[in-house]
Amino acid sequence: MFRWLLAIFVILLLINAVTPWFKRIGFGRLPGDLNFRIFGREFNLPFTTTIILSLVAAGIARFI
């Protein structure tokens, strides 16, 4: 179980580190990505970005 927790932690750190780079190239601002502000807090729901990144990951996994 410790391995899974460690793996999830590392994956979350990588996602957190790569997010600004994705925003610079346009991910998170695609049509279908919801960005809204409530009570001074900003919320992002990147539906389209998630679908595109999932398709890319599936394509890479198919070739490996």
Image (spheres, rainbow, N blue to C red):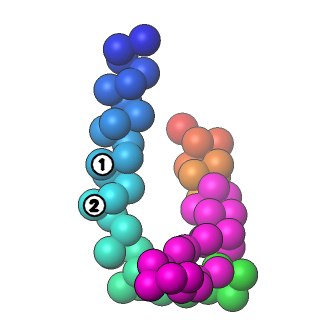
Compared to 18, does 5 lie above or below? Answer: above
Write the residue at 36% across / 85% down: 24
Whether residue 57 can be seen here: yes
Q: Amino acid at mark 1?
A: Leu
Task: Kindly identify which residue carries mark 1.
Answer: 13
Whether residue 28 can be seen here: no
Q: Is residue 63 left or right of residue 21?
A: right
Write the residue at 60% across / 71% down: 46
Mark 2 in CB contact with mark 1 (< 8 angstroms):
yes
Residue 41 percent location from the top left of the image: 45, 78
Task: Kindly identify which residue carries mark 2.
Answer: 17
Residue in the foreground of this view, choosing between 26 and 32: 32
Q: Amino acid at mark 2?
A: Ala
Q: Is residue 41 magenta?
A: yes
Q: Secondary structure at mark 2?
A: helix
Range covered by the magenta-colored residues: 34-55
Q: Is residue 48 magenta?
A: yes
Residue 64 percent location from the top left of the image: 54, 38
Corner quadrant of residue 4 = top left
